[in-house]
Amino acid sequence: MDGWLFDIWSLESTWAIKKGLVPSTGFDALLSTTFFDLDSAVFHLSERVLYCSSMHQEALEKRTLGINLRENPNPESMACRAVNLALENDFALTRELAEFVVDNYRSHGEQGIVRSYLLALEEMLRGDAGIKSLKPRLQSRLWSD
């Protein structure tokens, strides 16, 4: 629809609700079921209203991607998606998400920018533990690899 990609499913068939991770308390419970904070927005078709969590708003304002609900059925895919979203949209990652990516990303022989990004994340995580968001500077790193 006008270049937007979206999923449609019922509240009861949502993975996090079926697994008992999020109580099915109503339509806005969907906001708590997404892995990424940036994804915690839902459009109610019949009401024609967009609901967004405060985490979604903050992620957009700060251009920082984080975790909304850590548990998910496919950690490797979420780690790959985090890298893609960060690189394509120039987002930083929260420390929690950066650690998740490093722990769950399975290399498939990546070269170039993805490889450099992952190496830079690992390097940053070994550094200052007080850093709350990480955004590797890749330009200089690409020339040194």
Image: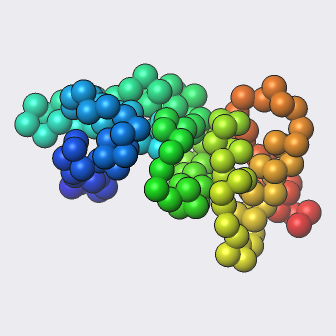
* Quadrant occupied by the N terminus: bottom left
Left or right: 65 as drawn, with respect to 21: right
Say which residue appears at 60% left-offset and 55% top-offset. Answer: 79
Q: Residue at x 24, y 27 (%)?
A: 25
- Residue at screen point 70% across, 63% down: 114
- Looking at the image, residue 142 sits to the left or right of residue 113; the answer is right
How many numbered circles are shown? Answer: 0
Residue extending furthest front? 20
The quadrant in which residue 26 appears is top left
Q: Picture quarter containing residue 128? A: top right
Where does the image place residue 58, in percent across and percent down from the top left? 50, 25
The answer to whether 42 is drawn above or below residue 139 in the figure is above
Across and down, in percent, residue 95 comes to 70, 36
Q: Position of residue 116 (x, y in %)?
A: 78, 61
Most extreme residue toward the top, as rendered? 54
Q: Measuring from the top left, give residue 30's x and y in whole percent.
A: 30, 36
Residue, far left? 46
- Residue depicted at x 22% and y 42%: 11
Residue 37 in sight in this render: yes
Q: In this rendering, is residue 64 above or below 87?
A: above
Residue 94, by quadrant, is top right
The colour scheme used to paint the residues is: rainbow
Q: Nearer the viewer, residue 44 or 28?
A: 28
Question: Is 131 above or below relative to 91?
Answer: above
Residue 102, above or below 59: below
